[in-house]
Amino acid sequence: MAARQQIPYGIVDFKRIRDEGYYYVDKTAYIRKMEARDSFVFFVRPRRMGKSLFVDTLRCYYDVNEKANFSRLFGDLDIGLNPTENANRYLVLTLDFSQVEFMAGETLEEKFSRYLASRMAGFVEKYRAFLPGLPAAFPMRGGADMFEAVVSCAGRETPIYLILDEYDNFTNTLLRGGGSEPYRAVTHGTGFYRSWFKAFKASCARIFMTGVSPVTLDDLTSGFNIAKNLSQHEDFNALLGFSEADCVKMFSDFKGTGKFTEGDPAAIVRAIKPWYDGYCFAPACVGRECVFNSDMVLYYLGELVATGHAPENLIDVNIRTDYEKLQLVADIQHAQARGNVEDVLPLTEEIATYGGLSFDLVESFPADRLSDVANFRSLFHYYGILSMAGRRKGMTFFKVPNVCVERQLFAYLREAYRRTRQPDWYVWQRLASEFAYDGAWRPFLERLAADFADTTPVRGGIQGEARIQGYMQAEFGHLKFFLMAPEMETARGFCDFALFPERVHYGDAAHSYLIELKYAAKDAADAVLDAQCAEAKAQLARYRADRFVPALARGTTLHQIVFQFKGAALHRLEQISEEAL
């Protein structure tokens, strides 16, 4: 089958995928599950997880105009083998709020009305045969009048199914540009945005609303009562993204096509798992079901089929730029707090320092309350920067899902640290290479310490070990030769920095590291510093005894190192042991 199929990287048109021979991972069973839950469904996921393709799949399944194409499009899929009674029953109105564009001189309401009018004109042209009461010469009036006229003509046999994609984009853009007051004018009281959601609920038989985050839900609840938020429901955890079984089957199906002729598909999927897997959205699924980023898997597979080997850069350039979503999150918070870029750094440093955060996820919140700590932390999960990973001290623990996101996070942090001198990155790269291949640990770590001393405080309140550890995480995170396990959880404690070879490209890296960071105030007594060092040595011995360490460090020389600071200055850099494994 795969010999005749193409890799659907970047393709979000369901009909094109089915008609032009693209590979399709069947997600249609979720259509039946959603119908069983409610007529009005809300579901959010991070970008690049397959949301747009699923939206278009819904459109094709419910669209009355696609009835003649049902067997061709769905016949061999789960929902085609057992369709629901609502298949091809609706007039489908799709609104994508990311397409709402500003024009000079327009108010926000005029902007929205213009977009809706354009969509309604296309809707009328597509479904005129099912709108018998509509005048032949349908007037090009405002969006509200056009919507009301169409709704009044839609009959019981062909009701309206509304799909709202990127529903939160409009308010996010508003907040970035104007702060909370314009936002409240739109979403509160008689604001036009709130009024529209009330009209949608009253006029449409079914609604599927999706976006990246649940902002505005609290503001719109009385106007649009979301019946079922399925975003954290265990039955829908894997609605978007690929399971490990999906990936193994897909790689198996494509093996033997193009230049992809070597390698065990299951072994390849295990190799890319640290890079692309790790997303969990339902508390009940923690520890038993995670999903891969679908775009990244397709990118990797495309390179494998085209060249016969893994891509040189495991982070696709189209994904790599997504770390800008951190800046988007920061911008929204700053619009609320009237702050600047440094205000968001403590949270990113905390993630880097501890490998994640513990908090209770807020399922919906008004956008003008993003500066609230709980809401802002929750937004990191909704944007895919953090994923559910377990429970700690009575709260959900969220961690960075994979190396791909981790590298983006550390890139953001690295740019945020300000230096008093311009660093020589060529020298940094040379020292990093010698650190990985020659075991020259002292020059590289001394360089990191010196660079840290040259940074200006990001904010006056950020001091001590957390700031040093955040900085070091950002630097170690750029070591392409290693997979880093920040705060690696072993059976015997948490190691500050565990560096093991990234074996897809750098399996010949000859050295691994367990590094314990210690910090004392700049006026700390020698006795305090010595006690810290003794503690670090004991911790390293415990970490080394963990049963997983030999496997992770196999074929390399393992170094155990104490990295101690007194204030911002390096105080002790000592290797406790090195051994060949």
Image: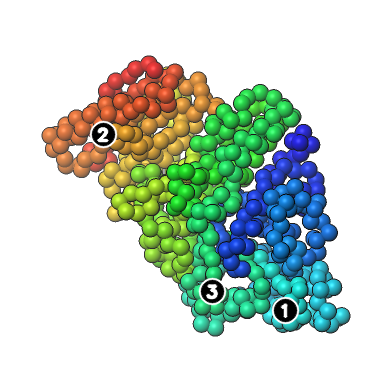
- Nearer-N-terminus badge (3/2): 3
SS state under label 2: strand
Name the residue: 61% across, 75% down: 201
Q: Residue furthest top?
A: 580
Which disc number belongs to residue 518?
A: none
Q: Would you say 303 lies left or right of 444 here?
A: right
SS state under label 1: helix
Give the residue type that dot 1 points to. Answer: Val
Q: Would you say 180 lies left or right of 83 here?
A: left
Q: What residue would you read off at disc 1? A: 151
Give the residue type that dot 3 points to. Answer: Asn
Quadrant of the rendered image containing residue 522: top left
Q: Indicate the quadrant containing the C terminus: top left, top right, bottom left or bottom right.
A: top left
Distance from disc 1 to disc 2, alpha carbons, whole Å, reads 69 Å
Q: Would you say 360 lies left or right of 332 here?
A: left
SS state under label 3: loop
Contact? badges 3 and 2 (CB < 8 Å) = no
Q: Is residue 124 visible?
A: yes
Q: Say above or below: 286 vs 423.
A: below
Q: Mark 3 packing: few (<14 Cα in 10 Å), some, or many (20+)? A: some
Q: Kindly report which numbered mark, 3 or 2, lies closer to the viewer in this rendering.
A: 3
Q: What residue would you read off at disc 2? A: 564
Name the residue: 69% across, 69% down: 161
Name the residue: 75% across, 69% down: 91
Q: What residue would you read off at disc 3? A: 225
Q: Mark 1 packing: few (<14 Cα in 10 Å), some, or many (20+)? A: some
